[in-house]
Image: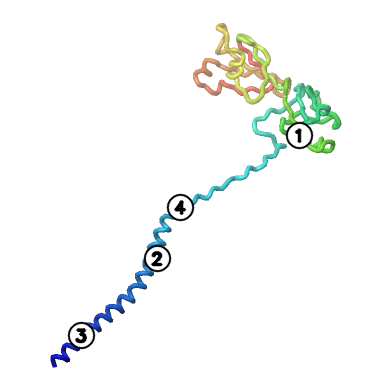
Amino acid sequence: MILDHGIDRRGSVRIRGIALLLLLGLALPLLGQQNPGKAEVTEAKAEVVQPKVEVAQPKADSVSDGAPGEYTVGAGDVLSINVWKEPELSLDHATIRPDGMISIPLIGAVRVGGMTVSQIQDMLAEKLHRFVSIARVTVTVTDIRSRFVYITGEVNRPGMYPLLASADVLQIIIRAGGLSPFARRKSIFILRNVDGKEQKIPVNYTKLMRGDGVQNVQLQVGDTVVVP
């Protein structure tokens, strides 16, 4: 009986050892499956996402529409027209006639009055393309004679000033060197021709300098600012 008991005890120990080995054999694959998951999470956290940058392609503007605020030429203005590598087609002084026309070699008379510089360049390049393979045209207004305003009276530099873009009374007074000490600041006025009739627009310079925007009248071509 003692021998059998010892055998049973040793057998029980063996059975427990075998069971333990079986449990370890089942647990190891599970641990192996868990570890890659942790590694994947770590890599995912370490991954740097590069921001996607979209570069907007510039849209080609229509030259024929003209840029906002670009000067519009008129009768009397003098243009310089340069055609790249074509000196015989270039003009240093092209005066716009009263009918708005100028004369260009090979092309003849073309109407440019009322057009912007960009529009003229585009139009001339298109017409010259029939005669030259590459027509690159640069137009410059060298003398403005069509858009003027006038200021007279008690200012330091009375005279005629080109109106390149929008301008107001205060700006033209500044360009004329300011008011003289004898100017009647409350009695300034603008003479404007509207449909053949002359209008008189009063301007109170004292109120203007106090911030009254109503007094700062926008000028139009041909206006005369009178400073008594």
On-image quarter of the N terminus: bottom left
For the residue pair 226 and 174, the one nearer the viewer reads as: 174
What amino acid type should be assigned to the residue bearing mark 1?
Answer: Arg
What amino acid type should be assigned to the residue bearing mark 4?
Answer: Val
Sequence-wise, the earlier of marks 2 and 3 is 3
Coloration of the structure image: rainbow
Q: Where is residue 193 in the image (x, y as percent from the top left)?
A: 70, 20
Q: Is residue 16 left or right of residue 104?
A: left
On-image quarter of the C terminus: top right
Q: Mark 4 points at which residue?
A: 48
Please identify the quarter of the rendering in which residue 74 is found: top right
Q: Mark 2 points at which residue?
A: 36
Say which of marks 1 and 3 sits in front: 3
Q: Where is residue 145 in the image (x, y as percent from the top left)?
A: 73, 20
Sequence-wise, the earlier of marks 2 and 1 is 2
What is the C-alpha distance between the residues marked 2 and 3?
40 Å
Q: In the figure, 54 relative to 117: above or below?
A: below
Q: Name the residue under label 3.
A: 10
Badge 4: few (under 14), some or many (20 or more) residues near its Cα, within 10 Å? few
Say which of marks 4 and 1 sits in front: 4
What amino acid type should be assigned to the residue bearing mark 2?
Answer: Pro
What is the C-alpha distance between the residues marked 1 and 3?
106 Å
Label for residue 218? none
Sequence-wise, the earlier of marks 4 and 1 is 4
Instruction: Single out the residue that lies furthest toward the top.
Output: 182
Q: In the figure, 24 relative to 100: above or below?
A: below
Label 3 SS: helix
Q: Mark 1 points at which residue?
A: 136
Label 4 SS: loop
What is the C-alpha distance between the residues marked 4 and 1?
49 Å
